[in-house]
Image (cartoon, rainbow, N blue to C red):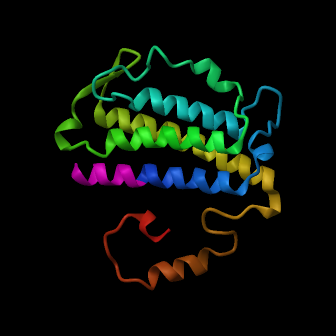
Amino acid sequence: MKSYLTSTIKQFEYYKSLGDKTINQLSFTELKKEFLEDSNSISVIIKHMSGNMLSRWTHFLTEDGEKEWRKRDEEFIDSFSTKEELIFAWEAGWSCLFKAITPLNITDLEQIIYIRNQGHSVTEAINRQMMHYAYHVGQLVFLGKLIKGKQWQSLSISKGKSAEYNNTKFSKNKARRHFTEDL
């Protein structure tokens, strides 16, 4: 289970890095682009993710993950006035998450915590949130790619480069490491 905690932190760092790299490629105007009326822009998705993270991870082990002070519906109203403000919210959410999970130990994993009065083991809650964030980061990347078109800088193996990538991987000795260590 110790490897679970280490892997969890690395996975969250990986998803954050995909979001960071997407945000860095886009202007503030591009971050606010809605493709359809009432669709979510990258800016809105970031606002929602930050609100969710702050609610879920603040006093994670002792309070319900859906805080009374959270205004979820307002997360879907784009109110950022600068890219710096958007990045501040993004960083605040992730910082809250990492401060909550970094000190966890094996004995914490079976503790029961609540989200909207629904009991979860800490492991279940971490998995729930990781999948939620991966879902939204995937949206950020997809929207970023649509917005940038041919100017998009790939965040994974570029088209037509799989053989080259695999040759590099297979040229190394077998070893146990997290896949993000080579990124």
Q: How many marks?
A: 0
- Of 88 and 144, nearer the camera is 88
**Residue 41, relative to residue 23: is it above or below?**
above
Q: Position of residue 24 (x, y in %)?
A: 67, 56
Query: Relative to 56, is 148 on the left or the right?
Result: right
Q: Quadrant of residue 89?
A: top right
Which secondary structure class fits the magenta region best?
Answer: helix
**Residue 171, relative to residue 53: is it above or below?**
below
Q: Is residue 139 magenta?
A: no
Query: Relative to 85, is 167 on the left or the right?
Result: left
Q: Position of residue 171 (x, y in %)?
A: 45, 85
Q: Is residue 2 magenta?
A: yes
The structure residue drawn at horizontal position 28% and vertical position 28%, both measured from the top left corner, is 61
Q: Quadrant of residue 90?
A: top right
Find the residue positioned furthest to the left. 107
Q: Which residues are magenta?
A: 1-10
Query: Relative to 164, is 132 on the left or the right?
Result: left
Q: Position of residue 157 (x, y in %)?
A: 61, 68
**Residue 26, relative to residue 133: is it above or below?**
below
Find the residue positioned furthest to the bottom. 171
- Of 32 and 2, nearer the camera is 32
The structure residue drawn at horizontal position 52% and vertical position 82%, both measured from the top left corner, is 167
Query: Relative to 32, is 113 on the left or the right?
Result: left
The structure residue drawn at horizontal position 44% and vertical position 43%, both measured from the top left corner, is 95
**Residue 165, relative to residue 122: is it above or below?**
below
The structure residue drawn at horizontal position 56% and vertical position 77%, both measured from the top left corner, is 165
Q: Position of residue 58 (x, y in %)?
A: 38, 29
